[in-house]
Image (tube, helix red, strand yellow):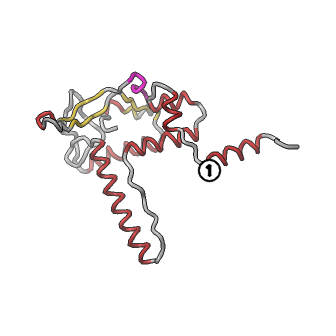
């Protein structure tokens, strides 16, 4: 996501092309090697076109408008790529580590407010667990598996080489989903006459 450029977004046809990512290399052994670079997906299956739902199209348009209204424009070129979509206020590309830190900050602020509110009302707080961008991908895939029966569609959208990856890692089935599925099956069939 952090490497998406305006060329990867086809608003008119409602398609996002995924064929690269912006990656941060920390250079832990040699600080002079610290840099951001463009990486291609690990496999050919990682290169894909993903249809946009209207909410994604709307969000992308809102980002573009926000950047325009606030004078934010891309000030970085990485390995020949520029015009990145997801920019911080300085016009630099957001990396996954930056987004993970921002998620952590938002969760901490929310949890602090909920702890205070619960204390004032003398009840248990509803606390968010800490999660990362990868957790959001995992959740999306699990919900997609619950709502899509064509496993090849899920595999293609997620960019998995092997359907087993999709099923073994992401296709967690919740107790509520199992119950709903069984109830739907019972409505469609007369099991006992």
Location of mark 1 (residue): 176
Q: Is 163 situated above or below 29?
A: above
Q: For the C terminus, which image quadrant? A: top right
Residue 8 at x, y percent in the picture: 35, 31
Q: Secondary structure at mark 1?
A: helix
User: Quadrant location of residue 47?
Assistant: top left
Left or right, residue 190 beside residue 156: right
Front in this rendered view, residue 116 or 61: 116
User: Quadrant location of residue 161?
Assistant: top left
Q: Is 4 situated above or below 133?
A: above
Give the magenta range: 43-50
**Residue at the farthest top position:** 44
Residue at 26 percent across and 30 percent down: it is 38
Residue 46 falls inside the magenta stretch: yes
Residue at 45 percent across and 28 percent down: it is 160
Q: For the N terminus, which image quadrant? A: top left
**Residue at the farthest right position:** 193
Q: How many numbered marks, from 0 up?
A: 1
Neighbour tally class for label 1: few under 14, some 14-19, many 20 plus, Cα within 10 Å: few
Residue at 30 percent across and 42 percent down: it is 96
Left or right, residue 173 beside residue 140: right
Left or right, residue 123 beside residue 148: left
Residue 151 at x, y percent in the picture: 56, 30
Residue at 34 percent across and 60 percent down: it is 108
**Residue at the farthest left position:** 32
Residue 93 at x, y percent in the picture: 24, 40
Residue 181 at x, y percent in the picture: 67, 44
Residue 22 falls inside the magenta stretch: no
Front in this rendered view, residue 72 or 137: 137
**Residue at the farthest front position:** 29
């Amino acid at each position: 996501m952090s490497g998406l450029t305006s060329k990867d977004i086809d608003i008119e046809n409602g398609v996002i092309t995924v064929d690269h990512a912006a990656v941060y290399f920390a250079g832990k052994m040699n600080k002079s090697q610290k840099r951001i670079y463009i990486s291609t997906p690990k496999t050919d299956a990682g290169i894909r076109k993903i249809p946009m739902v209207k909410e994604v199209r709307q969000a992308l348009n809102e980002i573009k408008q926000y950047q325009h209204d606030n004078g934010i424009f891309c000030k970085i070129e990485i390995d020949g790529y520029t015009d990145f979509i997801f920019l911080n206020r300085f016009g630099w590309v957001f990396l996954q580590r930056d987004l993970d830190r921002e998620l952590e900050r938002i969760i901490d602020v929310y949890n602090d407010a909920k702890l205070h509110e619960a204390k004032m009302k003398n009840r248990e707080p509803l606390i968010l667990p800490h999660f990362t961008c990868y957790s959001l991908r995992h959740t999306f895939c699990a919900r997609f598996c619950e709502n899509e029966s064509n496993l090849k569609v899920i595999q293609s959208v997620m960019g998995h080489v092997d359907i087993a990856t999709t099923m073994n890692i992401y296709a967690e089935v919740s107790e509520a989903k199992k119950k709903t599925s069984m109830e739907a099956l019972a409505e469609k069939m007369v099991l006992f006459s």
